[in-house]
Amino acid sequence: MPYKDILERRAANRRSHRKNSGEAKKRRLRLESSGLCIKCAARPRTTTSKRCEICSQKHASQIRTRKLQYVLEGRCHTCGKPRDNLNVQRCSRCTNRTRPKAIIAGKARRQADKLLVFNAYGGCKCACSGCLESNIKFLTIDHINNNGTSERKNFGSGGIFYKYLIKNNYPAGYQVLCYNCNCGRGANGGICPHVELDANNN
Ligand SMILES: [Zn+2]
Ligand SMILES: [Zn+2]
Ligand SMILES: [Zn+2]
Ligand SMILES: [Zn+2]
């Protein structure tokens, strides 16, 4: 339920606080442990929600309507307070509350993907015979056929590229190289200067 006025909203918050303490809270806890819907107390709760199927659908639609109302009124769609930046759909407080979490989660996901991909292409070590680099921070996926530029255009780079490789069950044509060997190979017509050096020494 949308409240146009901030005072109205505060009053609603107070009401909901009362609802969430004392007798009402006891009732909710009792229902939660019994496996019944905390709203109607008649039907069993679903596995993903504290409410039954019908009540959780009703609840979701209420939230949808409220969000829509907030957006229509030009307010933050999460908390309903006025937005400080009209180009962003949420107020700065709500944005700051979720953004760092999202960034950290995204970074961890990309890191996990990177590890999966490296393990599929021979593990965390540079594939160049003249190089011992095994620090993952120095390693990258190298396109054996030297078509990195066109592939980056087709499949994206970084996290998106790792996702593409995982989804396609690690297609052939890639290897793990350190950035040094990767660049060296690129600048030296496809052969890392390390390998050339080896050949000259023998
Ligand atoms: Zn219910
Ligand atoms: Zn907000
Ligand atoms: Zn290397
Ligand atoms: Zn090398």
Image (spheres, rainbow, N blue to C red):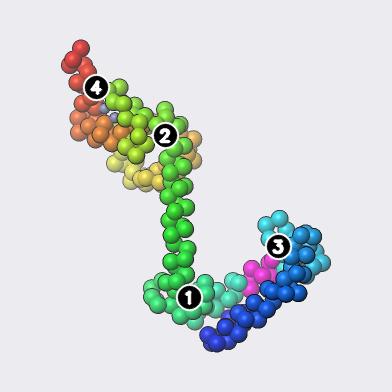
Taking depth in this image into account, of 20 and 38 the one nearest to the observer is 20
Question: Mark 3 or 2 closer to N-term?
Answer: 3
Which residue is pictured at 59% across the width and 71% down the height?
A: 64
Give the residue type that dot 4 points to: Val
Question: Mark 3 or 4 closer to N-term?
Answer: 3
Q: Which residue is mark 1?
A: 76
Does dot 1 land on a helix, a strand or a loop?
Answer: loop
Taking depth in this image into account, of 109 and 72 the one nearest to the observer is 109
Which residue is pictured at 55% across the width and 87% down the height?
A: 7
Q: Would residue 61 be found to the left or right of residue 174 on screen?
A: right
Q: Tell me if the residue at label 4 has its CB under 8 Å from ligand 4.
A: yes
Question: Quadrant of residue 62 in the image?
Answer: bottom right
Which residue is pictured at 43% across the width and 46% down the height?
A: 110
Residue 60: in magenta span? yes
Position in image of residue 143 (x %, y %): 33, 34
Position in image of residue 185 (x %, y %): 24, 30
Question: Mark 3 or mark 4, which is nearer to you?
Answer: 3
Q: Which residue is mark 3?
A: 50
Q: Which residue is mark 2?
A: 118
- Is residue 141 visible to the viewer in this orientation of the structure? no
Cα distance in 3D space between marks 4 and 2: 22 Å
Cα distance in 3D space between marks 1 and 3: 26 Å
Identify the disc placed on residue 195: 4
Mark 1 burial class by Cα count in 10 Å: few <14, some 14-19, many 20+: many
Does dot 3 land on a helix, a strand or a loop?
Answer: loop
Give the residue type that dot 3 points to: Lys
